């Protein structure tokens, strides 16, 4: 778990510092912790926008902790399922400019998606 969070932190730092990304779509956010994606990215670039997505009602209940954006940036939370990408993109459009680069975060979520053919 610690290695996973360390990876996420390094990836967000790299994308923000080296690649210049200013928009993140983090699907499978999990319960808020410290630091969250927006805290890492906005520490480098306060104008960064982050949309968090999860389908767990428990995460939704704690989502307020993810909305502590810097004044220059923006954070939003979508209660949505990874398997409904159109709904996610529709919801994210209110906060992210989808004509500009967006980093897609799928940290420790893909193993939850079952193969319907199995
Ligand atoms: C192991 S946690 C990972 C949390 C965080 N990304 C991290 O790396 O620490 C996986 C999260 O994915 C969410 N999740 C699982 N399947 C999902 C789906 N189909 N759509 C949206 N979220 C999903 C779970 O609710 C859970 O919060």
Image (cartoon, rainbow, N blue to C red):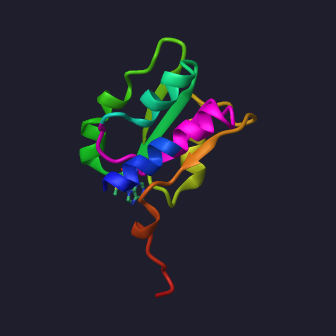
Q: Position of residue 87 (x, y in %)?
A: 55, 48
Q: Nearer the viewer, residue 8 or 64?
A: 8
Asked if residue 3 can be seen in this view, the reply is yes
Q: Residue at x 31, y 56 (%)?
A: 1
Tell me which image quadrant ligand 1 sits in: bottom left
Task: Looking at this view, name the residue that lies furthest to the top.
Answer: 71
Which percent across, then down, holds residue 76?
Answer: 46, 30
Position of 56 with respect to 53 (left or right) is left
Q: Residue at x 58, y 19 (%)?
A: 47
Please state the total of marks drawn on the protein image. 0
Q: Is residue 67 above or below residue 117?
A: above
Q: In the drawing, does residue 60 fall left or right of residue 117?
A: left
Location of residue 67 (image quadrant):
top left
Where in the figure is residue 52, as x and y percent of width and height? 45, 39
Q: Which residues are magenta?
A: 11-33
Q: Nearer the viewer, residue 30 or 39?
A: 39
Q: Hey, which residue is sitting farthest bottom in the picture?
A: 118
Q: Residue furthest right?
A: 99
């Amino acid at each position: 778990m610690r290695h996973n969070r360390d990876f996420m932190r390094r990836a967000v730092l790299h994308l923000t510092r080296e690649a210049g990304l200013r928009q993140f779509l983090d699907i499978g956010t999990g319960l808020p912790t410290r630091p969250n994606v927006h805290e890492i990215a906005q520490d480098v670039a306060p104008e960064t926008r982050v949309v968090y997505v999860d389908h767990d009602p428990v995460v939704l209940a704690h989502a307020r902790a993810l909305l502590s954006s810097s004044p220059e940036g923006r954070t939003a939370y979508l209660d949505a399922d990874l398997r409904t990408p159109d709904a996610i993109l529709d919801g994210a459009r209110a906060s992210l400019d989808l004509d500009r680069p967006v980093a897609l975060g799928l940290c420790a979520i893909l193993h939850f998606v079952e193969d319907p053919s199995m």
